[in-house]
Structure formats: structure tokens, C-alpha cells
Image (cartoon, rainbow, N blue to C red):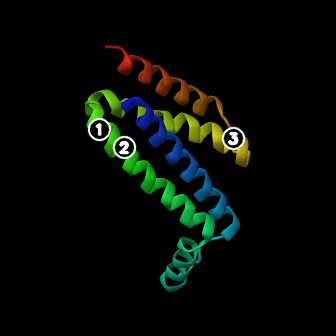
Amino acid sequence: MGYFFVALTVLLTVFGQLLIKWQVNLAGTLPTNWHDKAFFLAGMVFRPWMVIALCAGFAGTLCWMVALTKLPLSQAYPFTAITFVLVSLGGAWVFAEPLTLGRIAGVLVIAVGIILAAVE
């Protein structure tokens, strides 16, 4: 049951990150002066999809707390690295971000690391 909550943590984190990127893309360029930046960011926080993204992050945190009641931290934590893999793939798929050879190699190294960390 602990791994179920780890998986929910990962999926909610990835979902939230992709939503945030989508909303940031729609918002445009960050203003240069601090006053306009503050209003820009405050406006972003209250966009409906941004609120959903922040709620996904909060729900992911709650799932993580439940996961840690079931699993040792050293056993659960390596699986959170899957977020790097899924966000990279999601960015490429949803936002047409480039999957360079270096990025692919990095994602593969992370995946191998997850497998090695999971083996007891």
C-alpha cells in the first residue's frame, strides 16, 4: 500500500508541474521590475488551473506523508526520481520541448539508478 501512495505522489507532482508550465507559457514574459513581477506572480497564483496545480502539489505531499507511514524513507525516496523522467517526457510530448541526447542519457541514468536503489 505504501508504494501506491508513492506512485500517487509522483503522478500528482508531475501533473502539477505540467499544469504550472502550461500556465506560465500562457502568461507570457516575466516583467523586469520587482513591482510588476510581484503583481504578475500574484495574478498567476489565482488562475484556476494554477490553483489546481498547487492543490495537486499539496495532495502529493499528503500522499507522501501516508507513504512514509508505510515505508522507510530510504526505500520510498528513490522512486520520487521518476518525476524527473516523467516531467522530461511530458515536457517533450505536451510542450514539444527537445529531447536531446544528453537529456535522454540523463533520464536513462536516473531510471537505472531507481532500479538499483529499489533492489534490496
Residue 59: x %, y % from top left? 44, 53
Residue 23: x %, y % from top left? 64, 63
| Front residue of this view, candidates 38 and 17 | 17
Q: Mark 2 touching mark 1, by CB under 8 A?
A: yes
Residue visible at 41% across and 30% down in the picture: 3
Residue visible at 52% across and 29% down in the picture: 106
Q: Quadrant of the N terminus?
A: top left
Q: Which mark is residue 92?
A: 3
| Residue 55, placed above or below residue 30 | above
| Front residue of this view, candidates 3 and 22 | 3
| Front residue of this view, candidates 116 and 76 | 76
Mark 2 residue type: Trp
Residue visible at 48% across and 81% down in the picture: 34
Q: Which mark is residue 68?
A: 1
Rounded to the nearest whole Å, what is the CA distance between mark 1 and mark 3?
31 Å
Nearer to us of marks 1 and 3 is 1
Q: Quadrant of the C terminus?
A: top left
